[in-house]
Amino acid sequence: MTRGQPCSATGWPPLAKERALRRAAREAEAAKLRAKRARTVARRQRRRAVVAKLRPKQRRTGRLFARRSRGERAGIVVITIVLLALVWFLVDDPGLKIVLTLLTVLCLPALVIVALGRRT
């Protein structure tokens, strides 16, 4: 009687072992990739947390001055005070001082919109 290799339901036994070895190698490689990705994600999250701590907090401007930045508002106030100071120091007639002051205060919003308008 000759002895041959026994058959199995999944194929020849050497072929099944070879497939199992290749699957184990693939799974080991996939596990390495997953670990590398996990380290990358963890490093990215730590970096973002550090950057978030270092970055200054966003301040709310409030509803009243939401359209202008702090620098723009300061510029508007400074220019207005300088203009009014020039009127009050350089003009001699008191009536003209009052008229120019009222004109400055009334025209200021229109000048601000024209000068600092957001629309193009």
Image (tube, rainbow, N blue to C red):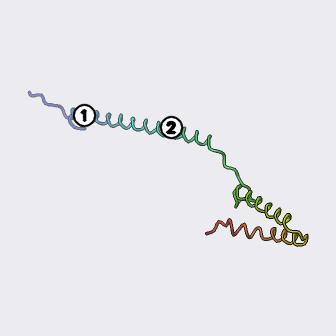
**Mark 1, residues whose alpha carbon is within 10 Å: few (<14), some, or many (≥20)?**
few
Q: In what quadrant of the picture does the N terminus appear?
A: top left
**Amino acid type for the residue under numbered disc 2:** Arg
Q: In this view, does 38 lie above or below 2?
A: below
Question: Looking at the image, is 64 positioned above or below residue 22?
Answer: below
* Crowd class of label 2 (few under 14; some 14 to 19; many from 20; radius 10 Å): few
- Helix, strand or loop at disc 1? helix
Q: Which residue is drawn at 90% across and 71% down?
A: 93
Quadrant of the snapshot with the C terminus: bottom right
Q: Earlier in the sequence, mark 2 or mark 1?
A: 1
Q: Is residue 120 left or right of residue 98?
A: left
Q: Observer-nearest residue: 91 or 80?
A: 91
Q: Which residue is drawn at 60% across and 43% down?
A: 52
Find residue 64 and report its horizontal and vertical position in percent.
Answer: 76, 60
User: Residue, x 81% and y 64% (percent of image)?
Assistant: 86
Q: Name the residue under label 2.
A: 43
Instruction: Give the image quarter of residue 105.
Output: bottom right
Residue 65 drawn above or below residue 52: below
Residue that label 1 marks: 18
Give residue 110's quadrant in the image. Answer: bottom right
How many numbered dots are placed on residues in this image?
2
Residue at x 63% of width, y 68% of height: 119
- Distance of mark 2 from mark 1, alpha carbons? 38 Å
Outermost right residue: 94
Q: Do the residues labelled 2 and 1 touch (CB within 8 Å)?
A: no
Q: What element carries label 2?
A: helix
Determine whether, in the image, residue 69 is placed left or right of residue 84. Answer: left
State left or right for residue 9 relative to residue 120: left
| Residue 22: image location, x then y, percent | 28, 36
* Coordinates of residue 91 in the picture (x, y in percent): 86, 68
